[in-house]
């Protein structure tokens, strides 16, 4: 035994020591070959000395000459980044962030923003420069083609900038606003655009991405703050504890990446295939996780005292109900409303030949939100919205372009997979987006709309003509279009998983265990307290008969006693 | 034979009866909350009280069953037909005519035949129905992974509630019958003091007097 152990130790040591000469050789090779960039020889003059404060990071990007600029474009910054981070661009190009394409192996569907339709702006194709303003790359002007295999087109800064002044313009296919900024230009968060200082941004970088890096795109999906998701809004930049117990500085103060762990620039967490059951049930709480699931940290039996009976009962629920169902009592909390209804069919109306808008919704912070726009139709908004609950196994099946729809019913843009009571399914909260979208009345398929394109004579948002917009959209993707369009009602489901409330704000038993509780109309569960069951009705009848029986018997006794007494006296 | 005031209900017997009364009332109240008949207390609290009280009652029943069999007390509850007709006729007819109750209690058979039959049905059918369905309901977490788990839960829940209402009906009739004859207080007193008037043979009288179990 001991000999074997010694032998193993010897082998391991040899392997470890063998690394060092190799490392030394590489260093030597580096000295001989001039590196890309300004320095031809290694220079350690900027390395921190013992007299300097010790930093968390091992590379201070503000000390690199190559990042001093000047840079004429974002792509030039990326070129500088790649001179050291040679593999980073390729990693990004293999991510959903870059490809906007997601292969669902279970359903066989090719999804992703580049392919699917949604209940908001409909489709990316033909509207690129506006939609791809949030792409993590530069210059994707045609999503009919994948992004070119060019790592210098990756936008490193959008995720790694720490200067806070890097942004993307909302109609430049991912490019930042640079000097001179066009009049009226806006950033992707809807602010008036400013000229970005690329050198300042380049020198500020340092992983990991902060919540503003993620949020500047993800909080503004669908064209504005919290429009799309409902549980991702600017309220999460600095949320109070009751809005998000994990992200609040008074709570966990998590960044997005705390849960959405990444590997090779690919992030965990997906609305196409969501983890609804514990993805790694064999793990101990607190050990390293590779999935963005509640159970990654909390396990599947997280409830403890003070009352062990209640705790056990709650832990009993986790095989039926997703954590989010109770712990996110409502979404769009924190003062930012989400769009709940989008009726495209009314778009295009003009007043005196001019587009107009109405602001019929007042957000809790006093801000007025559009309820009608000639460009987009009618909207409804909601704050503190009660989710829609459904059994889900996390698999979303989409109604893709060219898929036959039934216009007599509400068309589900995405269908929630899973079976009531199934081992792989839990009752999960969703934002159910209600919409009205254009479809081909002859072919029964959803239509591509061309909405963005000032100056091209067909874009809906500039010319308010559905005929032209839809024809242009369908021509762009090369699909058949009868020219006969109508509008069909649609639902689109967005999993609700952010804005987890502190435990004292979680749903209580009565939220569901009551008449017309939150689980009403869901199959596959029996919810005590949701109404008097058949046994209860029968029992109640028996009980009432017993009560009536004794009352009748008692009444007869009282009456007969009177008679008997009368008889005695007589 | 003469009527004497004998200690019929031992201390354990009375403790059993009254703690059963208290727990069954609590179970009715919390159970009605869980069914949604009222919302006087929070659902979660009702679950806790219902569970704890039910388990305590089951423990009491286990002790009572043991006690009944070791003391031979179970014989009181064995149903018999003898005298059934007279008692039935009394409740259906005689009571309205001001007749006396036809049954004279003895030490060995303190329940009249109808009463004994009712208690037998309660103990052999309704109580098992409620606690077997209750335990199955409570242990749902251990078997809900089985196919059709929630279907069976619904069946069990319905059964449990039905049994509960049947027991509630028993309680209503039980309490009502105490008002017949010598009156409610007269009927409840023995279960408080332990002493009740029963017919004794001279031998039994002598025995109980020696034991100090006679009041007069």
Image (cartoon, grey):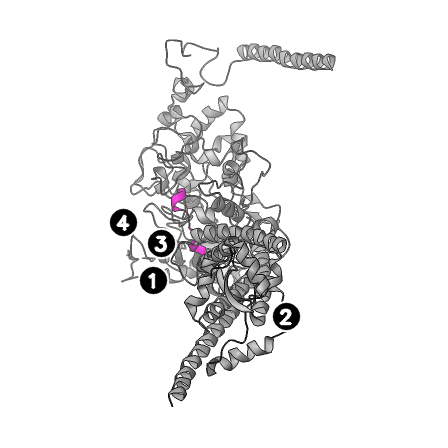
**Residue where numbered disc 3 is placed:** A382
Hey, which residue is sitting farthest left in the picture? Answer: A366
Residue A367's disc is 4
Q: Is residue A499 magenta?
A: yes
| 3 or 2: mark nearer the eye | 2
Label 4 lies in what chain? Answer: A
Label 2 lies in what chain? Answer: B
Residue B12, percent from left and from top: 52, 53
Q: How far apart in space, not on screen, are marks 2 and 4 (Cα)?
A: 82 Å
Dot 3: few (<14), some (14–19), or many (≥20) neighbours within 10 Å? many
Q: Does the magenta stretch include residue A343?
A: no
Q: Do the dots labelled 3 and 2 sit on one chain?
A: no
| 2 or 4: mark nearer the eye | 2
**Residue where numbered disc 1 is placed:** A349
| 1 or 2: mark nearer the eye | 2
SS for tag 4? loop
Residue A407 can be seen, yes or no? no
| 3 or 1: mark nearer the eye | 3
The residue range painted magenta reads A498-512
**Residue where numbered disc 2 is placed:** B80
């Amino acid at each position: 035994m001991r000999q074997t152990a010694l032998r193993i130790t010897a082998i391991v040591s040899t392997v470890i020591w063998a690394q060092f000469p190799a490392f030394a050789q590489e260093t030597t090779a580096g000295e001989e070959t001039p590196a890309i960039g300004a320095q031809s020889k290694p220079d350690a003059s900027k390395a921190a000395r013992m007299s300097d404060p010790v930093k968390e990071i091992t590379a201070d990007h503000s000390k690199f000459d190559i990042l001093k600029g000047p840079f004429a474009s974002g792509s030039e910054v990326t070129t500088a980044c790649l001179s050291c981070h040679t593999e980073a661009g390729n990693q990004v190009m293999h991510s959903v962030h870059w490809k906007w394409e997601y292969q669902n192996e279970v359903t066989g569907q090719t999804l992703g923003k580049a392919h699917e339709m949604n209940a908001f702006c409909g489709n990316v194709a033909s509207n690129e420069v506006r939609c791809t303003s949030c792409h993590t790359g530069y210059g994707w002007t045609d999503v009919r083609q994948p992004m070119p295999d060019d790592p210098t087109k990756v936008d490193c800064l959008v995720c790694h900038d720490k200067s806070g002044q890097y942004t993307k313009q909302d109609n430049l296919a991912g490019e930042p606003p640079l000097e001179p900024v066009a009049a009226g230009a806006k950033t992707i968060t809807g602010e008036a655009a400013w000229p970005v200082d690329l050198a300042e941004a380049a020198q500020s970088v340092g992983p990991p991405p902060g919540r503003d890096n993620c949020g500047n795109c993800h909080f503004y999906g669908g064209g504005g703050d919290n429009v799309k998701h409902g549980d991702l809004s600017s309220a999460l930049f600095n949320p109070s504890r009751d809005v998000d117990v994990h992200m609040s500085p008074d709570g966990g103060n998590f960044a997005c990446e705390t849960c959405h762990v990444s590997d090779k620039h690919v992030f965990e967490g997906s609305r196409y295939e969501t983890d609804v059951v514990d993805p790694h049930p064999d793990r101990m709480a607190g050990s390293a996780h590779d999935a963005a699931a509640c159970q990654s940290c909390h396990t599947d039996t997280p409830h403890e005292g003070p009352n062990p009976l209640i705790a056990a009962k709650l832990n009993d629920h986790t095989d039926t109900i997703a954590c989010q169902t109770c712990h996110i009592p409502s979404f769009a909390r924190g003062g930012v409303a989400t769009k709940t209804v989008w009726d495209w069919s009314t778009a295009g109306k003009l007043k005196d030949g001019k587009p107009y808008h109405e602001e019929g919704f007042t957000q809790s912070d006093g801000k007025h939100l559009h309820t009608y726009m000639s460009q987009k139709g009618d909207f409804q908004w909601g704050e503190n919205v009660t989710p829609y609950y459904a059994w889900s196994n996390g698999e979303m099946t989409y109604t893709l372009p060219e898929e036959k729809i039934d216009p007599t019913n509400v068309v589900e843009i995405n269908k929630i997979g899973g079976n009531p009571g199934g081992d792989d399914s839990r009752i999960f909260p969703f934002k159910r987006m209600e919409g009205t979208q254009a479809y081909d009345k002859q072919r029964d398929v959803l239509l591509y709309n061309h909405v963005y394109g000032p100056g091209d004579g067909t874009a809906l948002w500039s010319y308010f003509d559905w005929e032209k917009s839809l024809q242009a959209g369908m021509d762009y993707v090369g699909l058949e279009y009868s020219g006969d369009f109508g509008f069909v009602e649609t639902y689109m489901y967005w999993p609700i998983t952010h804005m987890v409330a502190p435990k004292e704000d979680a749903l209580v038993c009565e939220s569901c265990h009551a008449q017309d509780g939150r689980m009403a109309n869901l199959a596959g569960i029996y919810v005590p307290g949701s109404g008097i069951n058949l046994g209860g009705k029968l029992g109640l009848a028996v009980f009432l008969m017993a009560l009536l029986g004794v009352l009748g018997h008692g009444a007869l006794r009282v009456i007969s006693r009177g008679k008997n007494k009368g008889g005695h006296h007589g | 034979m003469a009527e004497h005031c004998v200690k019929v209900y031992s201390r354990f017997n009375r403790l059993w009866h009254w703690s059963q009364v208290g727990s069954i009332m609590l179970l009715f109240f919390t159970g009605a909350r869980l069914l949604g008949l009222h919302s006087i207390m929070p659902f979660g609290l009702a679950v806790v009280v219902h569970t704890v009280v039910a388990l305590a009652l089951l423990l009491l029943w286990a002790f009572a069953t043991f006690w009944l069999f070791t003391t031979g007390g179970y014989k009181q509850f064995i149903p018999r037909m003898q005298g059934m007709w007279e008692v039935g006729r009394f409740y259906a007819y005689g009571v309205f005519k001001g007749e006396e109750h036809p049954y004279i209690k003895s030490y060995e058979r303190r329940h009249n035949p109808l009463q004994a039959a009712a208690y037998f049905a309660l103990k052999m059918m309704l109580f098992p129905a409620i606690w077997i369905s209750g335990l199955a309901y409570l242990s749902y977490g251990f078997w809900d992974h089985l196919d059709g788990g929630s279907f069976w839960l619904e069946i069990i829940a319905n059964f449990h509630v039905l049994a509960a209402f049947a027991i509630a009906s028993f309680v209503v009739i039980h309490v009502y019958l105490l008002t017949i004859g010598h009156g409610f207080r007269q009927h409840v007193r023995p279960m408080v003091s332990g002493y009740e008037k029963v017919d004794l043979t001279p031998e039994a009288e002598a025995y109980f007097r020696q034991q100090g179990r006679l009041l007069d």
